[in-house]
Amino acid sequence: MTFTQPGLQLIIPETEIAATVSRLASEIRRAYASKNPLFIGILKGSFVFLADLIRLLDFPLEIDFIVACSYGKGMESCGEVKVLYEPRLPVKGRNVVVIEDIVDTGLTTAAVVEHLKKQNPASLKLCVLLDKPARRRMPVKIDYLGLTVPNKFLVGYGLDCDEKYRNLPDVYVLEAECQTNSPT
């Protein structure tokens, strides 16, 4: 079911997302079926993608999360990345797959990858649903890439604007300014 609301333009329908997640799961299955990998989702945006992805994997794995942010209120990155929550499972010696919803400037993703590398995993790969290379400020090596998207502000399928729109099953371009609930 496509969501209709003024200011939202459908860019990636749910069916295309499902096919992309299925393709990524197939690629990951070939690489990790016998390795009991640790999947680390970058919250909050990756949770929908991660949930759909792991349900397509039929081998032992573990899941944990990391919270890092470079966005405050609104639609622009503040440029400073903070790790707010660490994975609880040990990373050292593990085959780690970092799950990210979208790589935009690359600042958050690069910071998380570097942060996890310092914990000495056996291997560390990055799986990204959406890549927006036009906004890249920091290089990021994506090992498993879903789709490349245009330089537009996207919402839906876990992507938000001030915590709104994460629940939409499709991905949309947000054509209007993001409305915040906080006083100006």
Image (spheres, rainbow, N blue to C red):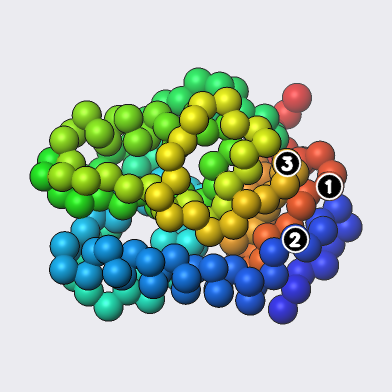
In the image, residue 70 lies at what x, y percent? 52, 29
In the image, residue 106 lies at what x, y percent? 52, 33
- In the rendered image, which residue does mark 3 sit on? 151
Q: Given the current orientation, which residue lies at the most extreme right position?
A: 6
- Mark closer to the observer (1, 3): 3
**Horizontal side of residue 98 vs 49, given as left or right:** left
Within 10 Å of disc 3 (Cα), the crowding (few <14, some 14-19, many 20+) is few
- Nearer the N terminus, badge 1 or badge 3? 3
Q: Is residue 102 above or below residue 56?
A: above
Q: Decide which of 182, 125 is in the foreground and name it.
A: 125
Residue depicted at 75% across the width and 24% down the height: 184
Is label 1 in a helix, a strand or a loop? loop
- The span from disc 2 to disc 3 (Cα, nearest Å) is 12 Å
Of the residues shown, which amino acid type is indicated by label 1? Glu
Is label 2 in a helix, a strand or a loop? strand
| Mark drawn on residue 11 | 2
Residue 115 visible? The answer is: yes
Is label 2 in contact with label 3 (beta carbons under 8 Å)? no
| Mark drawn on residue 175 | 1
- The span from disc 2 to disc 1 (Cα, nearest Å) is 12 Å
Of the residues shown, which amino acid type is indicated by label 2? Ile
Residue depicted at 50% across the width and 21% down the height: 80
